[in-house]
Image: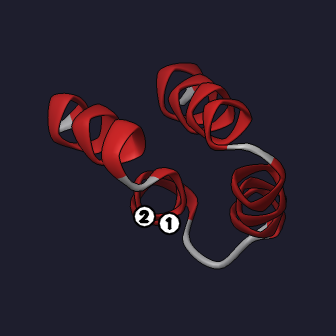
């Protein structure tokens, strides 16, 4: 299941984080990072998925 989340995190970072943690703080941080730059959103999403 983590492979699917990582693929989604690369395509749409907030979706990958949402599937991992739901509508928590990390989800909103990821949305802000994705708005500020696509790459920081991807890095944060993969980090959240790999950490859990």
**Total count of labels:** 2
The residue that mark 1 highlights is: 18
Residue visible at 57% across and 39% down in the picture: 45
Q: Answer above or below: position of 24 versus 17.
A: below
Q: Quadrant of residue 51?
A: top right
Q: Quadrant of residue 23?
A: bottom right
Residue visible at 79% across and 69% down in the picture: 28
- In the picture, measured across the screen, residue 12 lies left or right of residue 51, that is left
Q: Position of residue 14 (x, y in %)?
A: 54, 61
Residue visible at 57% across and 60% down in the picture: 21
Q: Position of residue 44 (x, y in %)?
A: 68, 33
- In the picture, measured across the screen, residue 8 lies left or right of residue 14, that is left
Q: Answer above or below: position of 18 versus 41.
A: below
User: Could you say which is closer to the camera, residue 49 or residue 41?
Assistant: 41
Residue furthest to the bottom: 23
Q: How packed is label 1: few (under 14 Cα within 10 Å), some, or many (20 or more)?
A: some
Q: How packed is label 2: few (under 14 Cα within 10 Å), some, or many (20 or more)?
A: some
User: Which structural element holds mark 2?
Assistant: helix
Whether the residues at callouts 1 and 2 have beta carbons within 8 Å, the answer is yes
The residue that mark 2 highlights is: 15
- In the picture, measured across the screen, residue 30 lies left or right of residue 11, that is right
Which dot marks residue 34? none
Frontmost of labels 1 and 2 is: 2
User: Could you say which is closer to the camera, residue 34 or residue 22?
Assistant: 34
Colour mapping used in the image: secondary structure
Q: Position of residue 1 (x, y in %)?
A: 15, 39
Split into 4 quadrants, where in the image is the C terminus?
top right
Q: Position of residue 50 (x, y in %)?
A: 49, 21
User: Which structural element holds mark 1?
Assistant: helix
The CA distance from mark 1 to mark 2 is 5 Å
């Amino acid at each position: 299941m983590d492979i699917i989340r990582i693929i989604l995190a690369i395509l749409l970072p907030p979706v990958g984080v949402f599937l991992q943690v739901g509508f928590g703080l990390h989800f909103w941080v990821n949305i802000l990072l994705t708005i500020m730059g696509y790459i920081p959103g991807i890095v944060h999403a993969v980090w959240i998925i790999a950490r859990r």
